[in-house]
Image: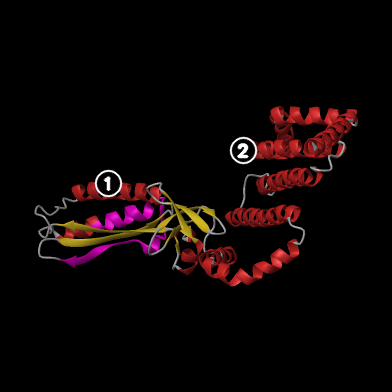
């Protein structure tokens, strides 16, 4: 029965190894094992305390942002604490020669993943820490903070992947060098990504717009709500969110409507052909004076109220003035001027065309 004897010998050795493992199980290892189990199930509580401690200095000035940042940090902190405790526990455990290598790699991988997950989430706190306490911040600085956070996340992600590979692959430098063989194929496949990244750099350094600006291009328009490394986010007038590749933005002709100091209102008023010339002159003079005296009308010299042209059916009067930059406010001012125009037309007996103009 040689096979049976060999099996019995093998089982005997395995039993001795297991007995030695539990015999050498130290009190400190048992303590840390208990802590690890508790952290695994109740990690939320210490993680919450640490997260709120990290944002404590910003709670007073930016309570909403601080609460949001703390909420995003809590899972990463909880897993980091658990992984650290587990790593310490494993160091205190007696060796199991057959499983030591693979077990160590698994624990190390877990710890590395937890550390880089924490660092990845920490970029959100850096974004908050750099925010000024006076609540007033230039849009360009806010954009720069966004770029910094996005760049840090990319760096952390790359370093994290390389660190995990280094745990399992001894010659990681050779693997990285070997990636150069397929570098051309990867570069060709990632042309659009690279172009968008370069476009984001162009936007960052040229500053054609910053967060909060209302921009218009031949293809789209909207308010800039986010500037990323690959794309930018715009909110259109109908409140729809669109994501535009930075390459397309960098290559487009961009009209930054937020950088103008005033907005032009240009209307044509049609009146009947049989109005008295004196009444028309008096009406236009008073309307011009009323528009210039309006507190929301800018550039008084640019105000125009004059006859544009004569048509077969009516007289066209050009009414042009400049007002506040905000679009909604402009509509309010324009509506008010239109009401004044109607009142003055009635006052001077100005008749409007009674037949369709088209």
Where does label 2 land, which residue? 68
Q: To which quarter of the image does residue 312 belong?
A: bottom left
Q: Locate residue 337, reporting x and y percent.
A: 31, 50
Residue furthest out toward the front: 1
Residue 202 drawn above or below residue 357 = below
SS label for mark 2: helix
Find the distance from the CA under tag 2 to the CA under tag 1: 47 Å
Q: Locate residue 244, reporting x and y percent.
A: 46, 58
- Nearest to the observer: residue 38 or residue 9: 9
Q: Which mark is residue 214?
A: none
The reply to whether the magenta stretch includes residue 206 is no
Q: Earlier in the sequence, mark 2 or mark 1?
A: 2
Q: Locate residue 81, reporting x and y percent.
A: 76, 37
**Highlighted range, magenta:** 284-310
Q: How many numbered discs sit on the rendered protein?
A: 2
Where does label 1 land, which residue? 339
Query: On the rendered image, what quadrant is the C terminus found in?
Result: bottom left
56 lies left or right of 324: right
Q: Are marks 2 and 1 in contact (CB under 8 Å)?
A: no
Label 2: how many Cα within 10 Å (few below 14, some 14–19, many 20+): few
Residue 112 drawn above or below residue 248 = above
Visible in this render: residue 60? no
Query: On the rendered image, what quadrant is the N terminus found in?
Result: top right
Residue that appears at 85% across and 36% down: 13
- Nearest to the observer: residue 278 or residue 241: 241
Residue that appears at 81% across and 34% down: 8
Q: To which quarter of the image does residue 221 belong?
A: bottom left
């Amino acid at each position: 029965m040689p096979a049976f004897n060999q099996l019995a010998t093998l089982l005997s050795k395995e039993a001795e190894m297991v007995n030695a493992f539990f015999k050498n199980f130290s009190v400190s290892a048992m303590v840390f094992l208990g802590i690890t189990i508790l952290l695994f199930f109740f990690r939320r509580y210490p993680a919450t305390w640490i997260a709120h401690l990290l944002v404590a200095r910003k709670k007073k000035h930016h309570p909403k942002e601080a609460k949001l940042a703390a909420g995003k940090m809590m899972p990463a902190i909880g897993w980091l604490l658990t992984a650290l405790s587990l790593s310490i526990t494993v160091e205190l455990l007696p060796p199991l020669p057959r499983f030591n290598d693979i077990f160590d790699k698994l624990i190390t991988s877990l710890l590395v993943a937890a550390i880089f997950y924490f660092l990845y989430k920490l970029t959100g706190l850096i974004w908050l820490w750099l925010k000024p306490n006076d609540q007033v911040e230039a849009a360009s600085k806010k954009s720069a903070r966004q770029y910094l956070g996005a760049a840090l996340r990319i760096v952390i992600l790359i370093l994290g992947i390389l660190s995990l590979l280094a745990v399992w692959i001894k010659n990681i430098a050779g693997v990285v060098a070997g990636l150069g063989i397929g570098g051309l194929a990867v570069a060709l496949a990632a042309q659009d990504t690279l172009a968008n990244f370069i476009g984001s750099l162009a936007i960052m350094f040229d500053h054609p717009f910053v967060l909060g600006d209302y921009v218009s291009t031949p293809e789209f328009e909207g308010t800039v709500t986010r500037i990323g490394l690959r794309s930018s986010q715009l909110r259109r007038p109908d409140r729809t969110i669109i994501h535009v590749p930075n390459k397309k933005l960098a290559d487009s002709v961009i009209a930054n409507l937020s950088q103008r100091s005033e907005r032009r209102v240009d209307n044509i008023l049609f009146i009947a052909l049989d109005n008295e010339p004196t009444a028309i002159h008096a009406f236009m003079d008073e309307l011009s004076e009323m528009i210039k005296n309006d507190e929301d009308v800018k550039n008084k010299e640019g105000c125009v109220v004059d006859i544009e042209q004569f048509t077969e059916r009516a007289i066209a009067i050009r009414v042009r003035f400049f007002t506040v930059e905000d679009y909604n406010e402009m509509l309010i001012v324009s509506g008010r001027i239109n009401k004044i125009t109607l009142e003055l037309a009635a006052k001077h007996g100005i008749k409007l065309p009674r037949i369709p103009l088209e």
